[in-house]
Amino acid sequence: MGNASAAHYHGFLVSPWCETRFWELRWGERLIAVAVVDLLPQGLSAVYTFFEPDMAAFSPGKLAVLWQIAEARRRGLDSVYLGFWVQSCRKMHYKDQYRPLDAWDGTLWRRFGPAEPIDFANTPE
């Protein structure tokens, strides 16, 4: 999103078909991260999280995911959707840490348990 306009960036973050929330994560008074989340009837959908670069060592992205899981439970919702997962993309590997994980193998949704490796080579037919 190199040189995106404010309107283009807003369009990327905010959904026209559901309620989008911007949840702030703070350390005392200091804003350390913002989690952009769509509220869906059966779960929360993580749209984007951005954080203070000098706070990276404290894993604010993981904190945001854990907060969203807790918030979904508090609301009695079934799931938290972390968005697309691309196995070859290093920046998306964090999504594999939250289980059970439902993944689309190109044909059907498959559920992977806590210790189960994600292996699409052994997709059932």
Image (cartoon, rainbow, N blue to C red):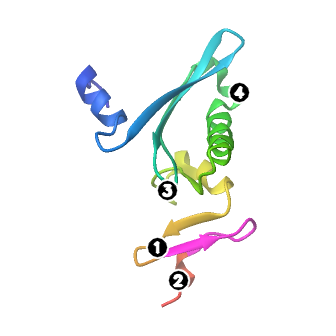
Whether residue 41 sits left or right of residue 65 in the image: it is left
First to last magenta residue range: 109-119
C-alpha span from label 1 to label 2? 7 Å
Q: Earlier in the sequence, mark 1 or mark 2?
A: 1
The chief SS type of the magenta part is loop
- Secondary structure beneath dot 4 equals helix
- Secondary structure beneath dot 2 equals loop
* Number of the label disc, if any, that sits on residue 17: none
Single out the residue that lies furthest toward the bottom. Answer: 125
Q: Earlier in the sequence, mark 2 or mark 4?
A: 4
Residue at image location 72% in from the left, 27% down from the top: 58
Rendering coords of residue 11 (x, y %):
28, 33
What type is the residue that disc 1 sits on?
Asp
118 is within the stretch colored magenta: yes
Rendering coords of residue 94 (x, y %):
62, 48
Marks 1 & 2, CB-CB < 8 Å contact: yes
Marks 2 & 4, CB-CB < 8 Å contact: no
Q: Earlier in the sequence, mark 4 or mark 1?
A: 4
What type is the residue that disc 2 sits on?
Thr
Marks 4 & 3, CB-CB < 8 Å contact: no
